[in-house]
Image (cartoon, rainbow, N blue to C red):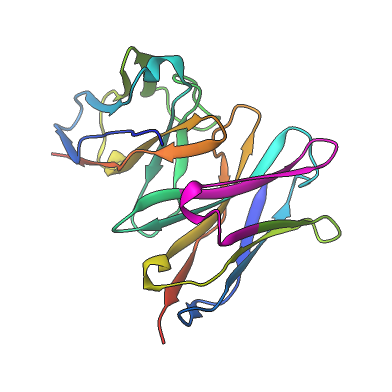
């Protein structure tokens, strides 16, 4: 059974960097048939896909246009986990953040538990 | 950017059939996935690839996709089906979600 366990702070100050980690069990993040995603949800923006990382002989990343200048998703194969960094946050980045897996058929089949991140001074 | 539209709310009588639509330009040419989300929980995949059910999802859940509209159908609706439902597609290398539909079972 695949499980995704999120960790990271729930409060970030404006202009600082939001950092979250997603630890994966039951699958390898280096799998050639899966990708590892970050998605957020807020009342104003609904569900918003932020980006993904995946391994196909080398690592690739795709990012949403809305956050492309501020986001980095990294994979740590030694710990079988991946991370999200979102720079220069504002209160508009306040949301529940989820990590999720999608296999080759591109649906998000396993999700983390969600982390409420509030951007406030 | 690819726009995906859903009705804000749908109501269905207990035991009847609910249909939730997902609109998009030529969405019939895309693979549509559906998620159920209950308050305080992460979304759960209920339909993938237009009409496929993951293991553990009741046969009462089905999906179709043609033209500019995809549809999630919930037969014999139960109280436990009350939730928000989201459709999702990929356009090139970006995932897009619909705004979500709140299903009420009367």
| Outermost top residue | B66
* Residue B74 place in picture, x, y as percent: 30, 26
- Say if B102 sits above or below B49 in the image: below
* Residue B29 place in picture, x, y as percent: 44, 15
Q: Nearer the viewer, residue A109 or A87?
A: A87
- Residue visible at 43% across and 76% down in the picture: A119
- Residue A71 sits inside the magenta stretch: yes
- Residue visible at 48% across and 80% down in the picture: A11
Q: Nearer the viewer, residue B53 or A57?
A: A57
Q: How many marks?
A: 0
Is the C terminus of chain A in the top left, top right, bottom left or bottom right quadrant? bottom left
Q: Nearer the viewer, residue A116 or A56?
A: A56
- Residue visible at 56% across and 58% down in the picture: A69
| Outermost front residue | A69
In this picture, residue A23 sits left or right of residue A20: right
In this picture, residue B75 sits left or right of residue A93: left
* Residue A97 place in picture, x, y as percent: 49, 60
- Residue visible at 74% across and 47% down in the picture: A26
Q: Nearer the viewer, residue A31 or B52?
A: A31
* Residue A5 place in picture, x, y as percent: 63, 61
Q: What residue span does the magenta drawing correspond to?
A: A49-72
- Residue B48 sits inside the magenta stretch: no
Is the N terminus of chain A in the top left, top right, bottom left or bottom right quadrant? top right
- Say if B80 sits above or below B4 in the image: below
């Amino acid at each position: 059974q695949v499980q995704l366990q999120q960790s990271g702070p729930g409060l970030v100050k404006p202009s600082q960097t939001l950092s979250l980690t997603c630890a994966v069990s039951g699958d390898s993040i280096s799998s050639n048939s899966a990708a590892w995603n970050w998605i957020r949800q807020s009342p104003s923006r609904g569900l918003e896909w932020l980006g993904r990382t995946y391994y196909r002989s080398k690592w690739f990343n795709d990012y949403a246009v809305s956050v492309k200048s501020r986001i980095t998703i990294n994979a740590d194969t030694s710990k079988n986990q991946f991370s999200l960094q979102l720079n220069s946050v504002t209160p508009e980045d306040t949301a529940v953040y989820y990590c999720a897996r999608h296999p080759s058929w591109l649906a998000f089949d396993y999700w983390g538990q969600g982390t409420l991140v509030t951007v406030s001074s | 950017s690819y726009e995906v539209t859903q009705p804000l709310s749908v109501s269905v009588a207990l035991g009847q059939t609910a249909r939730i639509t997902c609109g998009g330009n030529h969405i019939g040419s895309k693979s549509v996935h559906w998620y159920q989300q209950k308050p305080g929980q992460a979304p759960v995949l209920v339909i993938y690839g237009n009409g496929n059910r993951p293991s553990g999802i009741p046969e009462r859940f089905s999906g179709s996709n043609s033209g500019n509209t995809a549809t999630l159908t919930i037969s014999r609706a139960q109280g436990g089906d009350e939730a928000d439902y989201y459709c999702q597609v990929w356009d090139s290398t970006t995932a897009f979600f619909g705004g979500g539909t709140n299903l009420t079972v009367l």
